[in-house]
């Protein structure tokens, strides 16, 4: 079947038709590098890594994912630490790359940085001014929202809703409260560049429009990011890019992933409920985190729990176990087998990763019932090929099980303490709490056996 994607701009699932096949262009908004990324930040990079893998099966993909290395948050963080901005951004760019590698996210084809595109940004702004879509005021350059009648079409919001939702600054130099900044002045202590409007720095939205144009052209096939970027960031990108390009379509397919929730709240730094990827990696294998991020459909919210990660690890145990039992113990390689059609079909239906994972688990069960070693090995090769589209099963089974055993789950002393605590709770007739400990250990692959004189335990994997 043909690939179908849900297009935020039309609010429908549409067949994917690139503008210039077989070439496909995709731009995904990258991180602002002033801190470590959290697991909610990581979801779009995993999701669009899967889409990139799928597209490369059929097209010549050019995938750009930017790094925002100049921003007021970066300025504030560098000032607080007393370091140069470049020192701060270099640290967090390196950390971001490490975290993405641990999650199995392949590098994009192009990774532009804002600081390397200042001349192009200035040129972009000058075009908007020349065409009557932007104006200078008190050292600022602002986009005139009323010059673009389709403003708000992407997010589906009215102008009043957008002003309230963006908590825009009603500055005296603005012609309209909704007008947004393209360039702003920098005082001597803040990073800045010379421009026709004085020393300053770019606004947030103009950066992505410029980098997308520079590396992918005026019209790109796919623009991705989290749902929280639809407004104001992508709405503003669409407005300024369309106007700078003389009305040419900016993006053919807008694709947005849902947010990661902690309990009933979305994960965000402002709420103080973030889980940093590198902290999670200290306790869990990155592949388990990746699978956990793919268990819900990308457009739906994902509730992040310890149980979700544990269940994902158990699934990987079963999948890697199929490879091990089939005598396949090397890392993944090209050309081993074609991906199963059921997995491909699931992913081509708007990246239905939950269904694709279910198909992989079903294939694992089929392999376990195989009558011959040769039949099991063939199914295992198909399993690995299908998992590869999801960025899974790329290591050898021996590496997976060695790493998992050494780095995850409670050690013997911790298990002994939990079993002793369970025995005490049983004596106190607190059976619900005792059962909770038993269930927790069972999820970690540890079975408690009640015998005469007490309890004993054993690992099942």
Image: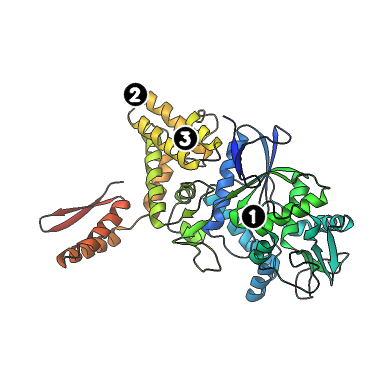
CA distance separating discs 2 and 3: 18 Å
| Label 2: element kind | loop
Q: Nearer the viewer, mark 3 or mark 1?
A: 1
Q: What whole-number distance in Å separates the C-alpha atoms at marks 1 and 2?
A: 52 Å
Q: Measuring 62% from the left and 31% from the top, which residue is drawn there?
A: 58
Distance of label 3 from label 1 (alpha carbons): 35 Å
Q: Helix or strand or loop: what does disc 3 sit on?
A: helix
Q: Indicate which disc, 3 or 1, sits on the residue closer to the N terminus.
A: 1
The percent coordinates of residue 107 (x first, y second) are 62, 47
Residue sitting nearer the eye, 216 or 335: 216
User: Badge 1 is on which residue?
Assistant: 230
Report the front residue among 249 and 96.
249
- Choose between 138 and 144: the one closer to the eye: 144
SS of the residue under disc 1: helix
Image quadrant occupied by the N terminus: top right
* CB-based contact (under 8 Å), mark 2 and mark 3: no
Name the spot of residue 43 as percent of width and height, x first: 54, 52
Chain-order first, disc 2 or disc 3? 2
Badge 3, how many Cα within 10 Å: few under 14, some, many 20+?
Answer: many
Image position of 57 with respect to 452: above or below: above
Q: Nearer the viewer, mark 1 or mark 2?
A: 1
Quarter of image, res 364: top left
Q: Which residue sits at x=24%, y=63%? A: 433
User: Callout 1 environment at 10 Å: few (<14), some (14 to 19), or many (20+)?
Assistant: many
Left or right: 49 in relation to 305: right
Percent coordinates x, y for residue 187 in the rendering: 79, 75
Q: What residue does disc 2 label? A: 372
Give the residue drawn at x 58%, y 45%: 49
Residue annotated with mark 3: 384
Is residue 301 left or right of 191 when viewed as pictured?
left
For the point 87% across and 67% down, the residue is: 197
């Amino acid at each position: 079947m043909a690939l179908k994607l849900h297009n935020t701009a039309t609010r429908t699932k549409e067949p994917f038709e690139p503008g210039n096949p077989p070439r496909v262009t995709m731009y995904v908004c990258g991180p602002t590098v002033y801190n470590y990324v959290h697991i909610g930040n990581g979801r779009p990079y995993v999701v669009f890594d899967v889409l990139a893998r799928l597209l490369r099966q059929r097209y010549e993909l050019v995938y750009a994912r930017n790094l925002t290395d100049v921003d007021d948050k970066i300025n504030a963080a560098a000032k607080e630490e007393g370091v140069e901005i470049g020192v701060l951004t270099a640290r967090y760019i390196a950390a971001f790359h490490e975290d993405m590698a641990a999650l199995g996210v392949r590098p994009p084809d192009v990774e532009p940085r804002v600081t390397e595109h200042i001349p192009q940004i200035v040129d972009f702004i000058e075009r908007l001014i020349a065409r009557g879509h932007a104006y200078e005021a008190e050292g600022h350059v602002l986009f005139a929202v009323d010059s673009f009648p389709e403003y708000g079409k992407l997010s589906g919001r009215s102008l009043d809703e957008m002003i309230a939702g963006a908590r825009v600054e009603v500055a005296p130099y603005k012609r309209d409260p909704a007008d947004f900044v393209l360039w702003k002045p920098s005082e001597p202590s803040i990073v800045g560049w010379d421009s026709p409007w004085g020393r300053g720095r770019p606004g947030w939205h103009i950066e992505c429009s410029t980098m997308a144009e520079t590396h992918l052209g005026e019209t790109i096939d796919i623009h991705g990011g989290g749902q929280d970027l639809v407004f104001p960031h992508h709405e503003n990108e669409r407005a300024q890019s369309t106007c700078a390009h003389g009305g040419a379509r900016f993006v053919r397919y807008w694709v947005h992933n849902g947010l990661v929730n902690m309990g009933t709240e979305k994960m965000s730094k402002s709420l103080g409920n973030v889980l940093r990827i590198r902290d999670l990696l200290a306790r869990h294998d990155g592949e388990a985190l990746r699978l956990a991020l793919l268990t819900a459909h990308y457009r739906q919210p994902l509730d992040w729990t310890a149980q979700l990660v544990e269940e994902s690890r158990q699934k990987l145990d079963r999948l890697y176990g199929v490879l091990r039992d089939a005598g396949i113990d090397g890392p993944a390689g090209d050309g081993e087998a074609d991906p199963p059609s059921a997995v491909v079909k699931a992913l081509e239906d708007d990246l239905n990763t939950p269904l694709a994972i279910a198909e992989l688990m079903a294939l694992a069960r089929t392999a376990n019932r195989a009558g011959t070693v040769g039949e099991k090995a063939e199914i295992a090769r198909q399993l690995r090929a299908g998992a590869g589209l999801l960025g899974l099963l790329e290591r050898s089974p021996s590496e997976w099980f060695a790493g998992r055993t050494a780095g995850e789950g409670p050690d013997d002393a911790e298990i002994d303490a939990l079993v002793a605590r369970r025995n005490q709770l049983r004596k106190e007739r607190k059976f619900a709490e005792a059962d909770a400990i038993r269930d927790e250990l069972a999820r970690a692959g540890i079975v408690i056996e009640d015998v005469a004189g007490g309890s004993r335990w054993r690992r099942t994997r």
